[in-house]
Image (tube, rainbow, N blue to C red):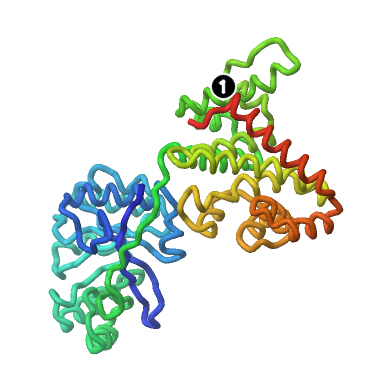
Amino acid sequence: MDSFVARQAILDKNGNPFGYELLFRLGLENRFPNIGAEQATRRLMAEQFLSQKIEDLVGNALCFVNFPDTLLHEGLADAFHQHNLVIEILEDARPTQALLDCVKRLKQLGMKLALDDHHPGSDWDDFLPFMDFIKLDLRQTPLEQCRRFIANCRLFTGLRFIAEKVETREEYEAARQVGFHYFQGYYFQQPQVIRRRLLTTDETTAFELLAAVNEDEVNYDRLTGLFSRDLPLSYNLLRYVNSLHLGYRNQTIDKLRNAIVYLGHQQLKRFTALVMTAYISKNKNAELYRLSIIRARWCELLVQHLDSSLVDDAFLCGLFSLLDILLERPLDEILPQLPVSDQVCQALLHNKGELGFLMGVIHDHEQTNWPQLQQRLAFMGVSQETSARCYEEAVRWSHCLSSYYRAP
């Protein structure tokens, strides 16, 4: 599932991107869709801020988002404690005491606020001490009126002014002269529509779990809560634990928290990584998931002949080596969201390091590049027979794994 958002740059006086206004879109067509403003903002916030990392879209710049006053009154903005979010109060909002109370509450929470398409007038004077930005539309407000308004606001030392609808070089130079700090308009950039792949609820849960199990101190209550909200995930965890447990005991583990604690940190990391890959593989070619887990075990076995301290990283390297195909996104966008080591990143992104060399062995074997494979194995001091046994063991392990773990 894809999301669409239009992004228009807001530049500083040196022409550097200071922020971006984000505009909701339903597809690649660059116009506002025929839906209500409230629904557009709800979806934009959910799709761009909750479902994925906003930094992947804007980097370190600020994000300016239109918030109808109805959403401010109901408290939607309160839930988003994003350091780079600027809440734009629209020009059709009424400067009521109730809205002013909302603004004060948001400022106490540390939020940044802007008046969008503002029409200078005394009605909004009580709001000015709480504003970070005021946007003035050059098509609506003459430059001389802008100059007077900016001058009258000198007492508000933290207030910055953004010129909107800047369409020519002359307008840009004139706007600088009257005191604007930032500039937005077609002279610099039209809104650019960007397609982003949305993670499904299952995928999002798996990413959250992977982050949680990789914390230095595991919060088992939090983990139990994450597992509990997904019934198939809980079921598979219990089956996985009991398949290990019954090897030497005659009782089953049927309580979720007990199962999580029983696994221990390393096994929990491994199970969660497998879960994440399974969820991402759902509704895709099942062979890709099977190949991922074969690669994981295969790398784990081979790396013991190279550097046994890299066993855990080698497992993740093989398991995540097909994420770009499964997620239909470049690996350099995916890996920063995952708690993996620099060695894994270097191997998957640049084929560097011992793990990069190891992935070369895997690829040569899969592509039947026998001369190159023989050279790599000789460098590792591994015979072809040992390499073949590692591959066969990895295939057996994948079959065994599927017997007690089902991808949801």
| Quadrant of res 137 | bottom left
Residue 21 visible: no
From the top left corner, tell me how far across and down residue 169 is, in percent: 26, 87
Q: Residues within 10 Å of mark 1 (few under 14, many from 20)?
A: some
From the top left corner, tell me how far across and down residue 376 is, in percent: 78, 58
Residue type at mark 1? Leu
Q: How many marks?
A: 1
| Quadrant of res 271 | top right
Per the image, the residue denoted by label 1 is 256
Q: Secondary structure at mark 1?
A: helix
Front in this rendered view, residue 5 or 323:
323
From the top left corner, tell me how far across and down residue 117 is, in percent: 19, 67
Q: Is residue 301 above or below residue 398?
A: below
Residue at the outermost right position: 381
Residue at 63% across, 16% down: 253
Q: Decide if residue 301 is on the left or right side of residue 278.
A: right
Residue at 29% across, 48% down: 43
Residue at 64% across, 38% down: 269
From the top left corner, tell me how far across and down residue 387 is, in percent: 78, 46
Residue at the outermost top position: 250
Q: Decide if residue 341 is on the left or right side of residue 23.
A: right
Front in this rendered view, residue 248 or 15:
248
Residue 270 visible: yes
Residue at 66% across, 43% down: 296
Q: Decide if residue 301 is on the left or right side of residue 260.
A: right
